Image (cartoon, coloured by chain):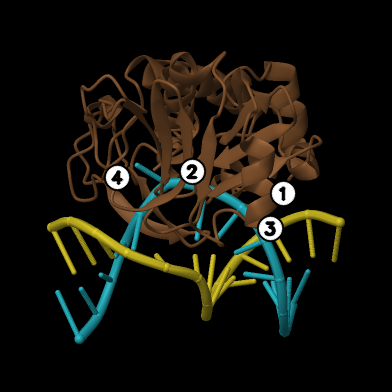
Chain colours: A brown, B cyan, C yellow
Amino acid sequence: MPELPEVETVVRSVAPDIIGKTIRSAEVLSHRVTRGDHAVTVSSLCGAKIETVGRRGKQILIHLDRGLLYVHLGMTGKLLWFSAAGEKTFSGKHPRAILHFDDGALYYDDPRMFGRFEYYAEMPQLLASVGPDALTVALADFATRLTRHRGRIKSVLLNQKFLGGIGNIYADELLFASRVHPLAQVSRLSKARVERMHVHLLEILETAVRHKGSSISDYVDSGGNKGSFQQHHQVYGRAGDPCSRCGTPIRRIVVAQRGTHYCPRCQRA
DNA sequence: ACTAATGTTGTAGG
DNA sequence: GCCTACAACATTAG
């Protein structure tokens, strides 16, 4: 569900719901999503005030006046805000954690439970291993970091240690826009090709954020609203469809255990 | 019944 | 250590 544009959209939508508010009570319902001692998590969260809501790659960082709430949406995680005033939005069917405020409640809903919802008294090391954010990385940084990785470009793009935030959808869309074959070896990419990839990376992510992300199956923001960038996908989920550039059918292969979509004519090996 | 799904982690082998 | 492939995690939808 969530790559950088979706996570950014969630952060932007949930921030005004909770910033400056105090958690009155907390419920933790899953031992998989929230690890450690649930009683400690609940007692730590109770009475804490939300100061800021931020993001690094796909990681959501909710800073409290005492510690940090770390949220990763995994594949199917959602943060849903329920206003006590009424206007019910989206009813999650798999709540894994709930924060109650005076004027509403924030639900962490996640059917597959691949996500995380964890409290840390101190800044965790989780963040250290994630590379710079893909939305703001400078060309020089992008190019330098690329040379430190080897293997297939698609695999490297999915590696969060390289850049934070790119997932399966945006990796495929970026490679199509840049006309790079997903199996291309990173070491063989020309300087011009790398520059082109950097331009398209920022362009695609910014556009996707403007469209509030891609709603492929059930992704929604904290108000239950879907994104619309899926309407602009050129290759992702379009196997067999004609390429928008040349008309050749889009092909689907598996790379790094992920479905990978590309145009065999526009993206030569 | 079978397959694939927006993600990450651990294991084994090269 | 880095890379690849594979399995695993748990659930839903086509």
Residue A196's image quarter?
Answer: top right
Measuring from the top left, give residue A231's x and y in whole percent: 22, 28
Do labels 2 and 3 touch, CB within 8 Å?
A: no
Going from the N terminus, do you reach mark 4 or mark 1 first?
Answer: 4
Residue receiving disc 1? A150
Looking at the image, can residue A81 be seen? yes
Frontmost residue, A128 versus A84: A84
Tag 3: amino acid: Asp
Q: CA distance from mark 2 to mark 4?
A: 14 Å
Going from the N terminus, do you reach mark 2 or mark 4 first?
Answer: 2
Q: Output the chain of dot 4.
A: A
Q: CA distance from mark 2 to mark 3?
A: 21 Å
Residue receiving disc 2? A73
Q: Do marks 2 and 4 share a chain?
A: yes
**Of helix, strand and loop, which one carries label 3?**
loop
**Of helix, strand and loop, which one carries label 1?**
loop
- Labels 1, 3: front one: 3
Q: CA distance from mark 4 to mark 1?
A: 41 Å
- Labels 2, 4: front one: 4
Residue receiving disc 3? A37
Do labels 4 and 3 touch, CB within 8 Å?
A: no
Q: CA distance from mark 1 to mark 3?
A: 40 Å
Tag 4: amino acid: Gly
Specify the label residue A265 is tagged with.
none
Answer few, some or many: residues within 10 Å of disc 1's Cα (few below 14, many 20 plus, some between 14 and 19). few
Residue receiving disc 4? A92
